[in-house]
Amino acid sequence: MSSKRLLSFVMFLVLCCLWVGNACAQSGRQDTLSVKPDSVYYITDEIVVTGTRVNSKIIDVPYSISRISNTQFKFEKKLAINNVLGSVPGVFMQSRYGNHDVRISIRGFGSRSNSGIRGVRILLDGIPESEPDGQTRIEAIDFNAVGSIEIVKGNSSSLYTNAPGGVVNFINNIYFPASYATSFNDYGEFNLRRNGLKLGIRTSDYGFIATYTYHNYKGFRAHSEDYWHILNLVLETIPNDRSKLEILGYFTSGLIRLPGSLTKAEFDADPYQAAKREVDFDFRRISKKGRVGIRFNSFFGEGNSNEIEITTYGTIKYFERTQRDYRVMNRYGIGGSGRYVNRSTIFNRSNEFSVGSDIFYQAGPVEYYDNINGKKGDQLSAIIDEMISNIGFYVQDYFELYNKQLYLLITGRYDNVLFDQKNNTLESQNDSRRFKSFTPKAALNYKFTPFIAAYTSYGISFDSPAGNELDNFPTSSSPGKLLNPDLKPQESNNFEIGIKGSVTNLNSKFFRNIFFEFAFFNILVNNEIVPFEVLGSVFYRNSAKTNRLGFEAGSDLELIQGLKLQLTYTFSQFTYKTYTALNIEQDSLQNFVEKQRDFSGNFVPSVPKHNLSASVLYEKMLLENFTAFTKVNFNFISGMFVNDANSDKTSGYNLLNFTAGLDYSIDKFNFILSGGVNNVFNKVYVGFININSTSGRFYEAGEPRSYFASLKAGYSF
């Protein structure tokens, strides 16, 4: 599809949405409240904070933004992030082994990461789970503790560090109406077991939750088992009617074994086997990490027109990473953020001004040992002190231009990211690199009605390399340095236009609720950071220019009372405009040779051109306080290229999933029984692509057919 045809199609959909919005009767959402243990059944006005770092209605944020409540995934498997975010347009996830190690990609940002999450900022209760350099692992996220998830799709660099693809904020469920205690137990295929307890206490002065989860999973591939202990705590106190104080903490400890990627021949022979090297050296990650944070929020001034918020936190992390070598990492971090908001009137127009800053400092040693058949060698081969710091400042203004309908949002951020490494085994080896940039963004939001708005935005994004991406390689311009001297930060120019709305007609028998969103984007990326291999080790380099053209569509329709249809579709056409590089390849004799390659015009790997999801949900009250739920979900993912050379392309695949559940309450007790099957027809497909593997190890299988069941029992008091 050409860009002109795609733009015409977008405009046609926009006109259709405007016609629907003006034709439908409008009415505000009515707040309802039903108290059940560990269940939030009241409907709010979709207030989010992640999009603008200020409490705002989704309709007022001129970006593509989604909010997911825990009630929307209470019957789901909840094993990994793709189980709860699978139906958000523009978000593509590749689960490596069916557990925490999930690649999240938004508009192509994040698709380059062969390990962890990059290009998308991950927050837990508004505090960065991402490292100062943007690298993220999400072992501490417990979906039994999460109350809501806010997803900002598209360039967010003007508000957050290293967030060209967007932001995902997991918010623990401190907002509940009554005290409760809950036990949850999940079981499934491949020895899946998740057991835990959750306690919530609510008084007029404070709220408190504590959630503990034990997770144990053998995995559907050989050598892919993992286990975790996850503890989350949130305490909220209200000193007065204008202030709030929160104490937030977590601790997680566990292990994940890594089965590695396969060649095409190995995948065809047995897609669920582990790579021999990974088994021989027992590739795995052992993690222990904890965090404690304190947040104070207060309103002051006439009509509470001023707001101030201060957050501080400290982190401790311990990692053991076993690959070709054996690494032991200790990291200690301290960070904080502050923001000030002023709401006023200028020339009889409403204006909201905010300014804020973030700082995150992390340091610690990395010890290197030999890997002797998966065991740590006795001899310390190197010890390197690593330090990463990030300091950022942002300013934002949201101004009413016309008649409480047209608004202008201007925001900008300055970031300064510093990497410093010292090799303590070689006193003369000390290296540092600094990346800094100012990233502005401007957006317009026009509200046709209080529930339908069109928006457009243009902004610059900045993404510094992560610490592991700065590892130096033998063919760089200075191979003796600790940090790659050639790798540049990734920058992009981002344009977006879209429309979103929510139409409610409670008096209608059909289509009582309609939610829709459509967005068209065009992104020009300079110095895109892409992975490549040298003798089995992964390094990173820059491509010159990349063009990303895309379209996202989503809708949630209540066809009749209790019956919903959810549709999401993402079209992505991402190509390298200019990209030449020295490539290391294997010849016919399996020798590694260097060749200059021109990848200009090729498609960006690991991004599907078409991503479609359709779900039919039906919820029915059978008896008083007894509700049944069922859901059928269909996913289609088109084939993806495996490398920059586009030498091979995976096959597209279709997946069918089924979920059912019962929700029963009696007196102060609540029971939720659910279960289902994923990949009903047991399709064999490539679920994760290891990009640009020199040895052709691109392929990792997606989850085969798997059953699961869950029982949650709660008591309110």
Image (cartoon, helix red, strand yellow):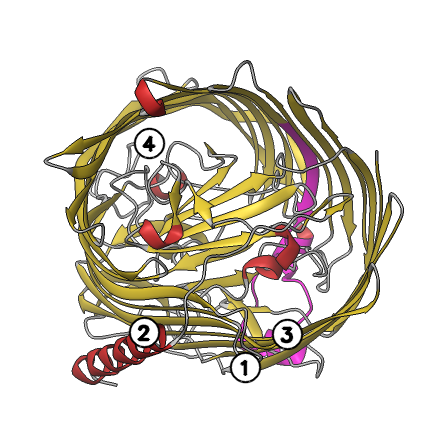
**Residue 633 visible, this orientation:** yes
Q: Relative to the observer, which residue lies in front, 313 or 605?
A: 313
274 in magenta: yes
Q: Residue at x 73, y 64 (%)?
A: 220
Question: As drawn, is 95 to the left or to the right of 627?
Answer: left
Answer with mark 1 or mark 4, whichever residue precedes in sequence. 4
Q: Which is closer to the viewer, label 4 or label 3?
A: 3
User: Where residue 686 appears, x then y in whole percent?
Assistant: 55, 73
Q: Residue at x 32, y 50 (%)?
A: 60
Query: Which quadrant holds the N terminus?
Result: bottom left
- When the figure is inspected, residue 294 is found, relative to residue 405, above or below; the finding is above
Q: Which mark is residue 653?
A: 1
- When the figure is inspected, residue 492 is found, relative to residue 266, above or below; the finding is above
Residue at which label 2 appears: 22
In the image, the segment drawn in magenta is: 250-279
Please state which amino acid type lies under the numbered disc 3.
Gln
595 in magenta: no
Q: Residues within 10 Å of mark 2 (few under 14, many from 20)?
A: few
Q: Which is closer to the viewer, label 2 or label 1?
A: 2
User: Where residue 113 appears, x then y in whole percent?
Assistant: 43, 53
Answer with mark 4 or mark 3, whichever residue precedes in sequence. 4
Answer with mark 4 or mark 2, whichever residue precedes in sequence. 2
Residue at which label 4 appears: 482
Residue at which label 3 appears: 561
Q: CA distance from mark 4 to mark 3?
A: 62 Å
Q: Are marks 2 and 1 in contact (CB under 8 Å)?
A: no
